Image: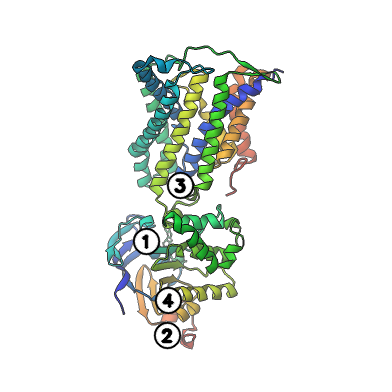
Amino acid sequence: MNPQFIMDGLIAGAIIGLGAVGVTLTYSILRFSNFAHGELLSWGAYLALAVAGALGFLSAGLTKPIAPFSFGWALPISAVIAIGLTGLLALAVDALLFSSFRRRGSAIIIMVMASFGASLALRSLLEFLFTSKPAYFTKALQIAMKLGGGLRATPDQLLMLGVALVAVVTVHLLMTRTDIGRAMRAVSENPALASIAGIDVRRVIRTVWFLGAALACVAGIMSGLLIQIRPYLGHDLLLPLFAAAILGGIGSVPGAMLAGLIIGLCEALAVQAVGAEWRAAVSFVILIAVLLVRPRGLFGKAS
Amino acid sequence: MTAPILSTHGLVAGYEPDLPIVRGIDFSVSSGELVVLLGPNGAGKSTFVKAIAGLVPIHAGTMMLNGRDITHVSPHRKVAEGLAFVPQTENVFATMTILENLQIAVAHLPKAKRGAAIEALFSRFPDLAARPSRLAGALSGGQRQMLAVARALALDPPVIILDEPSAGLSPKIVSEVFDMLKAINAGGVTVLLVEQNVKAALAIASRAVILAEGRIAHEGLPEELASDPLVGKIYLGTAHGHQGAPA
Ligand SMILES: Nc1ncnc2c1ncn2[C@@H]1O[C@H](COP(=O)(O)OP(=O)(O)OP(=O)(O)O)[C@@H](O)[C@H]1O
Ligand SMILES: [Mg+2]
């Protein structure tokens, strides 16, 4: 068996993991499955593409690749801006849609259905604005480097793994060491108690939307850079995202990342062992197995 | 009696819009008092204090804290304005450590003052200081109650409301809790205490209010209520009221 599946799996898994951290945070604090989370990945990628395009238009030098990577300064700069814009997009969707349901104390199923609607609308809007033709951050080709042990990776891929690692460690430290992190965990456990403990629950909810969207944007850009950008980019990752969030244990940031890597590796293994058409089944099987055997996942709190 | 520090006027509150549980309560606590709120199960005691804390929708009426209208102030702002509340159940963050529970409680203070505030709580509640990294969910009932009270006292609130802090505790711990409440009150904090433990509560109270079916049914000095057999029988579910107030 070709060991390269490990590298492919880690990269796919890092993207899934970053998306799953957002899913696990929004799920544990807003208490509903946000099926529009995938669209935040797609929007993140397209927003970065649009900003990078504009930057390249202003100064062609920004698109000149920074050795050894395939992209110029336009991409990291636009990534930072796109993270902010994706966060604002999530806040806008919450303000227009979910917050009114929250105020009315609507049932969870209503929030979930609303998120389906939001997913459809956001995706259609992307197709309308950018068409469904695949787009790319860069046309430059990269040669994979030999890493030893039969593994090969491009500099872009290694950088993305590093970015994912830094992002997850940062979010984990934020959750465990800071006021806002403790406040998020408190709201996730008991919103009423959190409010009488002095926590501004609405501010926490805004923070969670922003944070989840920011991570989704990073994941979307990673996927766009390493594969391609399509309006269905995030939607097609939805099942792996939820499988990873549940396997990791709802609310656990390291759990979501680890589970994302596990799912990425299992997918890559399945592709090599039984064929590419089975990739999509992997998440489904893992999701069902976790729900049956250990519903609280790897690091979930027993309820 | 001094001016009321906390008061409600015609307060109507409940979980559903057309189903009032608290049905028009005019109530006030003066600074320094320890008022005990009694009444049968389902009388609406918890709903009343949760409404004051901002956890139950207000249908009508107003409430004032320190001369300020706080009827529609959000719960976390009420905390910042000096109203502390210890709910009847789920009153600590079970999935977080003792220290984290207290860190949340002092988050309203400037960063430089938080350490000292937590130290002060630890010296007041030495049981909690022993192992601050323990999960609150792993504490005994009594320790949990201590943590909940410590959390509520973190900002030195002028008013603290406690909903049945002695529920489910062993008699020895119950008397510790009541001693603690007495000490808190003696330290100048106004206390509103919901209790089922009538005798012990009346023993430390400066005034007692009895709630029934969402309204105030009786109000008076603890010794009057304790010695009124009718009150004892109807509202407190105890036939021993005539034995008089414990000293
Ligand atoms: N979360 C809730 N949603 C809807 N109704 C509730 C809720 N909590 C309490 N009630 C109802 O409100 C009424 C008063 O309940 P409440 O808990 O205020 O009584 P209580 O006086 O505190 O009783 P206890 O002594 O048992 O604690 C009851 O009829 C109860 O069924
Ligand atoms: Mg009660």
Q: CA distance from mark 3 to mark 2?
A: 48 Å
Tell me the kind of residue under disc 3. Answer: Ile
Disc ID at residue A180:
3
Chain letter of disc 2 in the image: B
Q: Chain of mark 4?
A: B
Q: Give the amino acid type for the residue marked by disc 4 in the picture.
A: Tyr
Inspect this view and state whether residue A287 appears.
no
Q: Contact, CB < 8 Å: mark 1 with mark 3?
A: no
Q: Quadrant of ligand 2?
A: bottom left
Residue B67 relative to residue B204: left or right: left
Q: Are marks 1 and 4 on the same chain?
A: yes
Q: Position of residue B26 (x, y in %)?
A: 30, 70
Kindly identify which residue carries mark 4.
Answer: B235
Does the residue at mark 1 contact the one at mark 4 (Cβ under 8 Å)? Answer: no
Question: Of circles 1 and 4, which is in front?
Answer: 1
The crowding category of the residue bearing disc 4, from other C-alpha atoms within 10 Å (few below 14, some 14 to 19, many at least 20), is some
Residue bearing the label numbered 1: B51
Nearer the observer, A137 or B51: A137
Mark closer to the chain start, 1 or 4: 1
- Foreground disc of the pair 4, 2: 2
The secondary element bearing badge 1 is classed as helix
**Mark 4–mark 3 distance (CA, rounded to whole Å):** 45 Å
Residue A254 horizontal side relative to residue B79, left or right = right
